[in-house]
Image (cartoon, rainbow, N blue to C red):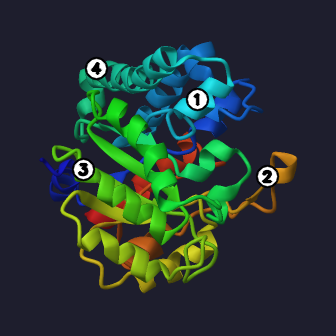
Amino acid sequence: MTDLIASLLAEQGFVILDGGLATELEQRGADLDHFLWSAKLLAEAPELIRAVHLDYLHAGADVIATATYQASFGGFAKAGFDREHAERLMRLSVDLALQARDRFWAEPANREGRLEPLVAASIGPYGACLHDGSEYHGNYGVSRQEILDFHRPRLDILADTQADLFAFETIPSREEAEVLIELMADYPGWTAWLSFSCRDGERVSHGEPFAECAALADASNQVVAVGINCTPPQYVSSLLDAAGRVRTPLAVYPNSGEHWVASENRWDGQECGIFPVSDWHARGARILGGCCRTGPEDIRGMRAALKKLAV
């Protein structure tokens, strides 16, 4: 087991993640008003996904995440795909990211001042498959075993690809994080980052203290980063302070500041504008990127800011 995130941090001092995949796909005309969200385009327009990955690499991302956040066997079955087809689409998601990375890295000019980017297999929470916004509250009404049984088949497939690590994203509760860490033991060659959605400056979406949830990472040698994603930027500084004693590297990739209205299938509220990267870095964040409603220009700006701080 190799900690590739630690290697990037040792060489560069920071790691830049990509931004919102769905956001950019919609910018290019994709209709994602569907319970499969970005995963819908694995079947309909895979070349568009690959193009967005490549744009994020050009913008400065050190890590790109696959289009599997919303992908699940249950979701694909609901859309009419049998299990074999669903598995092929999950594997394709990794192949598209690898193709974008290889195309980017094949150009000598792109290597100047850069390290070879990584591909993270995105693992969304159980709530993502419900398409009802429950990744922002975690009140699933199912047992711990049902959550485990939901995640295992997808992990089995993605662990049999050439992705570099897992990205457990928008996890709303301590219980689901514990389930994912428990499952990681069955994939001993793999590492993951663990990122929570949060309701305010102290608690994850389900209500547990973020400090307690983040501390789970220190107890696992397979969790190589822990942090916050798809959370309004105004909460990030307080959350980083709450996690001050965590030894595991801290990751931050917030949304734009708007909030998801699940009943109307839309975003609402005010964008935050400029992200206070210097402040987050001062509070310990070394892995930064964007989530929903962020794009390549946000990632380009984050990389420029962190390069200045790393000098």
| Name of the residue lying farthest toward the left | 1
Label 1 crowding class (10 Å Cα cut-off): few <14, some 14-19, many 20+? many
- Tell which of 145 and 37 is nearer to you: 145
**Disc 2 marks which amino acid?**
Ala
Label 4 crowding class (10 Å Cα cut-off): few <14, some 14-19, many 20+? few
In the rendered view, tell whether residue 233 sits above or below residue 267: below
- Tell which of 144 and 22 is nearer to you: 144
| Name of the residue lying farthest toward the right | 264
Q: Percent position (x, y) of residue 131?
A: 70, 45
Cα separation, mark 2 vs mark 1, equals 18 Å
Cα separation, mark 3 vs mark 4, equals 28 Å
- Camera-near label (2 vs 4) is 2
In the rendered view, tell whether residue 187 sits above or below residue 92: below
Q: Secondary structure at mark 1?
A: helix
Cα separation, mark 3 vs mark 1, equals 23 Å
Cα separation, mark 1 vs mark 4, equals 29 Å
Cα separation, mark 3 vs mark 2, equals 32 Å
Residue holding disc 3? 191
Q: Percent position (x, y) of residue 211?
A: 42, 82
Q: Which mark is residue 107?
A: 4
- Image point 37% across, 20% down: which residue? 95
Q: Percent position (x, y) of residue 32?
A: 72, 31
Residue 31, visible in the rendered structure: yes
Q: Secondary structure at mark 3?
A: loop
Q: Earlier in the sequence, mark 2 or mark 1?
A: 1
Image quadrant assignment for residue 187: top left
**Disc 3 marks which amino acid?**
Thr
Q: Earlier in the sequence, mark 3 or mark 2?
A: 3
Q: Does residue 65 appear to the left or right of 294 in the view shown?
A: left
**Disc 1 marks which amino acid?**
Ala
